[in-house]
Image: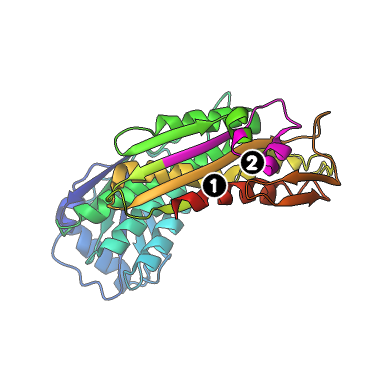
Amino acid sequence: MNFELASMSLGLMADDATDLLLVLVPDGFKPGRDRLSRLIGEAMKSQALETKAGKLLSAWRAPGVAAERLVLAGAGDGSAAQVRTAVSAAMAHVKSAACRRLTVAFAGPCAGGALRAAVLAVADGSYVYTTTKSKPEGRKLHDVVIAVADDTLSEPFRQATALVAGIEWAKEWANRPANHATPRQLAEAAQSLAKGKIECTVLGPKQVAKLGMGSFLAVAQGSQEPLRFIELRYDGAAKGEPPVVLVGKGITFDTGGISIKPAPEMDEMKFDMCGAASVLGVFRTLSELKPKINVVGLIPACENMPGGKAVKPGDVVTSMSGQTIEILNTDAEGRLVLCDALAYAARFK
């Protein structure tokens, strides 16, 4: 989806021949003389429109408005939280509409936080997963214009679109089924981010064994899919500056191992790698934002399967920190992979 920031008065917004014009109307709105302002003023006077956040009034081919569909949304006090409520309500209201181009217009003052909230709410409300669908409906919405009277909001807008890129990258990998999000595929996704200030190192079973990550290896040993230990580094500050370290659990599918989970809803265990997806999303955003900080992302990625080589209840393994662990339940795989990842993270201080 393409986002664009436009400096535009309400009068000009009425002439925007967009598929859908969403106008956010705050408390205390005072209409001007232009067509759109007068229309909003009349709707408020007749009490057809309330400015409470989330209240909506919609019209098709409204007189004097070039947009095919018009939605007026109450934005309350205009704060980020209330703008998000307003946009979310509007997106739910029009989700089934055949809309390729959307203009979101602020009828009152717009602060940076409110603008970010509007962009994020549009992205969230229009998100559709399509990757593995044979006949995907697809995302109808393609172009979004954020129209504001203030022309000093380019930085909050840049931040918002960078956040959307990272959030949608995380959603993409979280929503994929396990056979389309294997440890190897997660590693390839991480490597695709390695450009500019981002570096990526991927370790396989031999390197992980050499590091002494016995508890991570134990979880992975029942699967035919080889584990991957992924290290992402973003260097935006001085070399000596201690990094923020993010550790994301990357169990790409969790059966529970020998201590197998009940069959109902086991398909949802594809989501056991959402920590890993979140780390990937953060680095996708870092590639756009380029902040002056250092960040390390660590993802221990593997499957937890009940194979002939799988770890058994009662087995004892040795973690990277040198501690022995008795595994009484193989469905405790998360703490087993994370303890080795956290021991590895200690090196970054």
Per the rendering, the mark at residue 122 is: none
Residue under label 2, please give it.
213
Element carrying mark 1: helix
The residue drawn where x is 25% and y is 65% is 111
Question: Depth check: 119 or 230 in front?
Answer: 230
Horizontal and vertical percent position of residue 185: 55, 28
Instruction: Kindly tell me whether residue 265 is visible in this rendering.
Output: no
Q: CA distance from mark 1 to mark 2?
A: 9 Å
71 up-or-down from 218: above or below: below
- Left or right, 312 with respect to 244, comes to right
Taking the magenta stretch, the answer to whether it contains residue 148 is: no
Q: From which residue to which does the magenta span run?
A: 210-232
Horizontal and vertical percent position of residue 292: 27, 52
The residue drawn where x is 81% and y is 30% is 307
Which residue type does callout 2 highlight?
Met
- Left or right, 195 with respect to 348, comes to left
Horizontal and vertical percent position of residue 208: 60, 35
Give the quadrant of residue 179: top right
Per the rendering, the mark at residue 344 is: 1
Q: Residues within 10 Å of mark 1 (few under 14, many from 20)?
A: some
Q: Are marks 1 and 2 in contact (CB under 8 Å)?
A: yes
Taking the magenta stretch, the answer to whether it contains residue 215 is: yes
The residue drawn where x is 42% and y is 38% is 98
Which residue type does callout 1 highlight?
Tyr
Q: Residue furthest front?
A: 322
Q: Quarter of the image containing the C terminus?
A: bottom left
Question: Depth check: 283 or 202 in front?
Answer: 202
Image mark count: 2
